[in-house]
Image: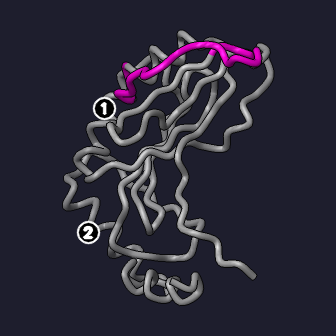
Amino acid sequence: MTKVPYLQLGHVGIYVEDLDRMIRFYERVMGYVVNDRGRPPNGGGEMAFMSRNLDEHHQLVFVAGRPKGVPSQIVQMSHKLRSLADLRTMHEIVAAEREATDIEIRAHGIAWSMYFKDPEGNIVECFVPSPWYVHAPSAIPFDFTVSDEEIFESTRKALQLRPDFKSFEAWKKETAVRMGA
């Protein structure tokens, strides 16, 4: 069998009901910038290409044309942050945003996460990786009324009680063998 070459997810495309509303939301709340906008040459809904990364022309593509009342097919879109402080800041931004709904926060063992729904009901995750691993799925409650250090320590203590607890580095070494890396 031929080994699959290196690849990584490049972008996510989503059919949307209201293209302008979604653009405004992702610009305002998530800091994305529209890099291109137009219609495909073979027809179809107007498209908006958005990114936050200079090395990526687009990370999100919104395509107009999803009929009203048809639910999104997206399970979630995840956005990686650098620190708990950054996650706390995103929580403040999202909590103040009237078009973001159903905000939830939890630690998964491998990450601290905040979830919310955008104006069309797509689930968005903002997460910060942790230095630990436990089997997924896992959910440990935490809140931002305590310091980042207290969140870190309370999560560590809860995870250490699990028999599958290990460092993320240990998990990576084990997984590298399975991936043939």
Secondary structure under the numbered disc 2 in the rendered image = helix
Q: Position of residue 179 (x, y in %)?
A: 58, 81
Secondary structure under the numbered disc 1 in the rendered image = helix
- In this view, the residue in front, 115 or 45, is 45
Residue count near mark 2 (Cα–Cα under 10 Å), binned few <14, some 14–19, many ≥20? few
Q: Position of residue 33 (x, y in %)?
A: 38, 23
- Residue at 37 percent across and 81 percent down: it is 169
Q: Earlier in the sequence, mark 1 or mark 2?
A: 1
Q: Is residue 6 above or below residue 14?
A: below
**Is 5 on the left or on the right of 126, as rendered?**
right
- Residue at 53 percent across and 58 percent down: it is 8
- Residue at 26 percent across and 69 percent down: it is 153
Q: Position of residue 71 (x, y in %)?
A: 76, 27
Q: Which residue is mark 1?
A: 92
Q: Is residue 173 above or below residue 145?
A: below
Q: Which residue is mark 2?
A: 153
How many dots with numbers? Answer: 2
Where is residue 90, by image quadrant? Answer: top left
Distance between the alpha carbons at the discs numbered 1 and 2? 22 Å
- In this view, the residue in front, 92 or 44, is 44
**Is 180 on the left or on the right of 43, as rendered?**
left
Where is residue 149, by image quadrant? Answer: bottom left
Query: Which span is picked out in magenta?
Result: 28-46
Question: Which residue type carries mark 2?
Answer: Glu
- Residue at 47 percent across and 34 percent down: it is 58
Q: Is residue 114 magenta?
A: no
**Is 74 on the left or on the right of 131, as rendered?**
right
- In this view, the residue in front, 56 or 76, is 56
Question: Which residue type carries mark 1?
Answer: Glu
